Amino acid sequence: MDPAYVQGLHDLLVQVTSADTAALKDATAKLNLEYYKNPSCIVALATIMASPAAGEGVRQLAAVEMRKRVAQNSGNMWGQLPQSDREQIKEKLPEIVLSDPDNLVRHSVARVIAAIANIEFPVGTWPQLLPFLHQTCVSPQVVHREVGIYILYTVLDNLVEGFKDHLQSFFKLFSQLLADPESVEVRITTVRALGVIASYIDSEDKADVKSFQESLPAIIQVIAQCVESGNENGARQLFDVLETLLILEVPILGKHIPQLAEFLLQMGGNRSYETELRVLSLNALNWTIVYKKSKIQSHNLSAAILQGLMPITTEPEPEDIDDDAPSRSALRIIDGLATGLPPSQVFPPLRDLITQYFSSSDPNLRRGAMLALGICVEGCSEYMTSLLPAVWPVIDAGLQDSDAGVRKASCVAVCCMCEWLSDECVSRHAVLVPAIMTLVNDPNTQRSACTALDALLEILHDHISLYLPGIMECLGSLLVDAPIPVKSVVIGAIGSAAHASKEAFLPYFESTMTHLQHFLTLTGEGEQIELRGITVDAIGTFAEAVGKDVFRPFFPEMMKQAFQALEMGSPRLRECSFLFFGVMAKVFEDEFAVYLAQVIPPLLESCSQTEQGEELSVVEATSAFGTGTSPQNAITIMDEKVDVNGNEMVEIEDLDVEKMMDANSAIAVEKEIAADTLGTLFAATRLHFLPFVEQCAMQLIDLLPHYYEGIRKSATDSLLEIVRTFYDISDHPEWEAGLNYNPLPQTVKDLNEHAIKALLEMYETEDNKSVVTTLCNSLAETINKIGPGFIDGHLEEISKMAMEILDQKAECQQDPDQDGDEEAPEDQAEYETVLISSAGDVVAAIANALGADFAPAFGTFYPLIAKYYKKSRSLNERSSTIGCLAEIISGMKGAITPSTQVLLELCHKALSDPEADVLSNAAFAVGLLVENSDMDLTAQYLQLLGALRPLFNVQPDSPANVMNARDNAAGAVARMIVRNVAAVPLDQVLPVIIAALPLRHDLLENRPIFRALFFLFRTNGAALHPYVGNLLPVFAHVLDPNVPDQLGDEIRGELVQLIGALNAEDPNAIQAAGLSIFLPSA
């Protein structure tokens, strides 16, 4: 090689490593132009890399650049070198890598070796490589062992497929290296190499699986050594490997899950270890629960894990909400247990711990108990309902605790209760509102209390009238005096007060708007931006409360403010503006149309913006969006500068990952809101939106594969809302059930086709249950709206999706540790039951759309649905099963006849269920079966009436679901009367059914009830004559023009005719009942 060529390259590399920007730029240009296009540069770089005189920085840079050239275009430049040069470089590299004194240089040279191995090893032209690596790994010199295992790790990462035949020898070698007596670096790198190998082991390779499993105790030991010694960098690498092992479908960890969970819990709970390392341990435990749920469940580990977590929840929390800490990690794991496992395994042991901790004299223990109680509600809400009489005293005591920290934690628990157990919270408003208002007036708890008040007011509805003046007086004063963080939650609470009180908010509207004007001009980062955003949200809620006529004077100025916020560079403010646009569109409808041309472009721009790090990979972006603990990138060498083709890549070290995570979180939420707003705008402005439909629909389709599940959910919902609205405004015939339907307009059909194809494609790989639940709910609504025309052509695919979910075989329901033919356990997490219920809704919608044509499919679906009605199943499963079958009966009508007997037997069982929700659906199903089946069920009447009779035994203060069951029972009896009045003992039945009127809860059942009354007036008026005095006030109630329609036009018209007939017999009674205004002559 020409020494001058080598020297020239050396001098330019020196320039590149200098601090002189101009020299660096000039040198880089010359290198690219004069050297890096010539294969000879590889030999020159190798010469510089081997020269001690070159200096560490230059040698390392030479190695980095050499690796790039070798890898470039799949090794094309390397292949252009003469064979003799290639052989000489391969011969020299082992000597270079072992002799260089600098660790960073050695690592860079190791990557050169890996790059060449990637090209040479698969074709068998570097047979010396493996013997060299083995010899180096067992060298008596520790530095050689460190270099050897690092090279092996990097080579495996690039080329593990080529080494599959050598795995057993590697396992033997690694078992020695895991116990290296001198170097933790050897032990750590060995674990990383094992992590690479794990990704390529097949479940069928029993010997490899067994060998790997035998190495697990040593791997855990190496992790423990790093944590105990405070080696954070090493621990991070090892926890990444562990998390990779957790997500693999090969059952490497299965048998060791109890020991692994215990180990991670011990690491996370040891307060003598570094905080960051404890958080890493707890994050790994969280991933263990997520990915090895079936093992956690089958070994019933929840109680032991909770026992270890509870002491951690009592530790101090950092002030900054974004800072992580062991206590927050522990609560996150409790949330994961509650949402991912059957509540029967989680809530009983947790309740015992909460009781124990809350009775402690240590306020930290009481605070931990209250936070744990709040965090578990999401996943255990249904299970908790019957146990609430024992839960409320704990919360009440917490709100009055002597320690401010406990009182604040109790406010958090109230927020959770309001979100997931809203009816139960509303029933205790007389206790909760005064208790929380007391804390609002306490500076020590003000912010937390306002947040709890916000959550409570959101659900209070009519009850707010009792408290509105006092609440508004208190919150109004805080708007003036409180610090900014408190003002933010105060404004949120005022918005919720407006939402609950509606027109009753009018007296406070203008004065509150005056108070809030100043906050709309804030421009400072952090708290000021947050306050401005919350103010915009609240004003949107005011508009919904007071109506468009009252809000109209503020409308143009507020739209101007929202547009200005879009230009301020804040994802949070853009998110708030988008929400505001959606609310304004709903309030002003056609009047909003003039803004569409200004609003749609920023929404589409938001949806299509690139998040930081997206160019790295979707997997890495997923990691960045979440907690930063995603395992998918664990075994990638993250400081590579080129991809497999030698193209430039972003250096991971050059990224501020924490900043990227924050930015991606904010942008992803902004995109989620933007996607949701598109569907809202179309539904509100309808025809005016038509010029934007195609572009918006295609943009939403593009978002369906997004890495963030919130965006996938909003894109799914919004896309199908666009489909429904487009159908609504098209010139379409009313659909009739069955496959012989009137064809849809071509434009509607085209849009449907684009949407369904994309959504079903998303479903095939969707691993998030909440996304699939959203898809099912939206599909069911859309099928019911558009009818058979929507599903024709995709009926088989949609049916297959529903069957997979009901059979618990969907991608999002898979557990790699569960055998494919193994039945899923009956005891399920509550989120699983919600998903299965949503699939049932899809089946019911298909039955509704197909009518009698659904009959061939019913036999397939029935066992999949009916298996969820057993005493051992949860309330939600039992209730949704019967409800689903009722809707199917309603859709199929007479075609249900062949299945009458089997359905009747199931309904009989359900009518003896202890839960009112199930009884309500069972009564509804029985009534529909009697009404629609062609089978004569007269012989069953007395038994059915006997089963329905207890549902009428209600008290004025009975819960809403008990009242709802009575309404459905009344509807069922009415259907029986119409179907065969001779089989009904009217003298016993009529007093009971008429005493249940007027219906107060399920108003749709008014229709069968009034049909029965009309039928009896026509055919057996004498039977009803004694009850006319009772019925007239009922007629007045359902015809009241001041309440929403309870009857529908047809029933209303017939009722007015009946009143006319009754007036002819007794006009005084009609006048006394206030019904004269409905007479034809009125």
Image (cartoon, grey):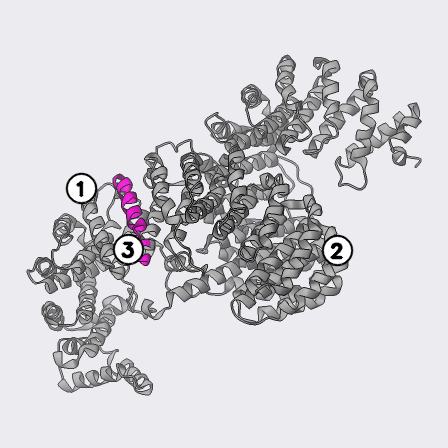
Report how far apart the C-alphas of labels 1 and 3 lie in the structure.
Answer: 37 Å
Q: Main secondary structure of the magenta part?
A: helix
Label pair 2/3, CB-CB below 8 angstroms? no
Res. 255 mark: none
Residue 409 image position (x, y, % from top left): 49, 49
Q: Amino acid at mark 3?
A: Tyr
Mark 2 → mark 3, Cα distance in angstroms: 57 Å
In the picture provided, is 271 more to the left or to the right than 892?
Answer: left
Report crowding for label 2: few under 14, some 14 to 19, many 20 or more residues within 10 A (C-alpha): some
Q: Report the residue at 60% width, 32% height from top.
A: 887
Identity of the amino acid at label 2? Leu
* Residue sitting at x 49%, y 57%: 703
Q: Residues within 10 Å of mark 3 (few under 14, many from 20)?
A: some
Distance, label 2 to label 1, CA atoms, is: 75 Å
Which quadrant is home to the N terminus?
Answer: bottom left
Which kind of residue does numbered mark 1 sit on? Answer: Ala
**330 w.r.t. 850: above or below:** below
Residue lying farthest to the left in this orientation? 140
Name the side, left or right, on which 994 lies relative to 902. right
Q: Secondary structure at mark 3?
A: loop
What number is the disc on residue 273? 3
Q: Which residue is mark 2?
A: 506
| Residue 705 location, quadrant | bottom left
> Which of 943 and 162 lies nearest the eye of the viewer?
943
Secondary structure, mark 2, is helix
Instruction: Please state if 875 lies on the left or on the right of 364 as rendered.
Output: right
